[in-house]
Amino acid sequence: MIDRFAESYVGGETPIPCVDCNQTIKFRDLLVTSRELGAQVLATGHYVASRLCPDGTRALYRAREDDRDQSYFLFATTREQLEFLRFPLGERTKAETRELARRFDLPVAEKADSQDICFVPSGRYTDVIERLLPGAAEPGDIVDLHGRVLGQHNGIIRFTVGQRRGLGIAAGEPLYVVRLDAGQRRVVVGPREALRTTRMQLREVNWIGEGTLADALALDRLEVFVKVRSTRRPQSALLSRAGGDVEIELLVGEEGVAPGQACVFYDARAGQARVLGGGIIKSVTSAAEPIDTRPSPRNAAAATRG
């Protein structure tokens, strides 16, 4: 899991290791151990809810408290796993949970909330990547939307889509990281409007709605709500197939969407509460002018010398 996290960053993505952790450790290894011990269910402390459907199966729902909802990180949960899992905190607020912890004299009652990646407690994920993949921080060019070189960087792993500060270049207008071109080691920057995404293609799609994804898309595009970041509210979108890909069209658009992040689907008919599934963002289409993908003069010259 940690290796995949590092490789994703080197590939110009912004990965979400919590999704992998839930699937490969908590809901696979731990679930297997629970069954081997003879447990009837596995309860976790995630702020998400599962409820019985009329047919006796279980569905996944957003938590009662919007600000605590963790459904974004659990979109890859399977139907089989949902039958065995229970989420007792999802129907409670954080304040109610802390009060219960105090009542039972649990030491975690006053524990501070944490937003850090568990294996990067310092928050400096680049240090972890460079230890795992020496030489991962290769220098390259910072270019504008037309491929013009504006400056140099010391590794694309030090940048994220949407970043404005710390670019190390002077410009007459605010510039943001629009895209990371790992193949040519380029950080592409542009104005804020270039950050707005209207379409995205997904990989590793998981469907836990009614029936199958093929059934849901059999007649037309499916109206859904989606989240492309854990801290953003769901927004209206259309889910469809485009060739061999699953595609999302955002009806309003979203800023700073990056490959490697998750796109999670919610049922538009259920008040955005039920989780239908989701996938990992493979590529995005900007609402702004297409980015010139030709090699920068510096990289082209280096390729010629090679």
Image (cartoon, rainbow, N blue to C red):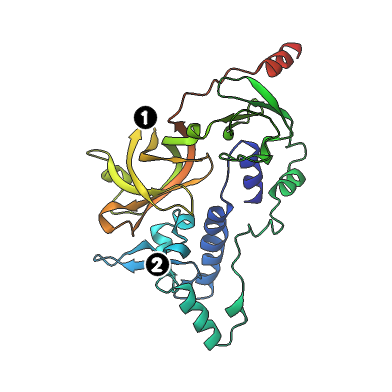
Give the image quarter of residue 162. top right
Report the side of 237 relative to 128 (left or right).
Answer: left
Q: Quadrant of the C terminus?
A: top right
Chain-order first, disc 1 or disc 2: 2
Q: Mark 1 = which residue?
A: 243
Identity of the residue drawn at 50% across and 35% down = 195
Q: Is residue 189 above or below residue 44?
A: above
In the image, 168 versus 260, the foreground residue is: 168
Q: Is residue 285 above or below residue 264?
A: above
**In the rendered structure, which amino acid carries the disc numbered 1?**
Gly
In the image, 8 versus 293, the foreground residue is: 293
Residue 123, image x and y in percent?
Answer: 68, 54
Report the side of 8 relative to 66 (left or right).
Answer: right
**In the rendered structure, which amino acid carries the disc numbered 2?**
Ala
Identity of the residue drawn at 32% across and 56% down = 272
Residue 112, image x and y in percent?
Answer: 61, 71
Q: How many marks?
A: 2
Label placed on residue 173: none
- Circle 2 residues within 10 Å: few <14, some 14–19, many ≥20: many
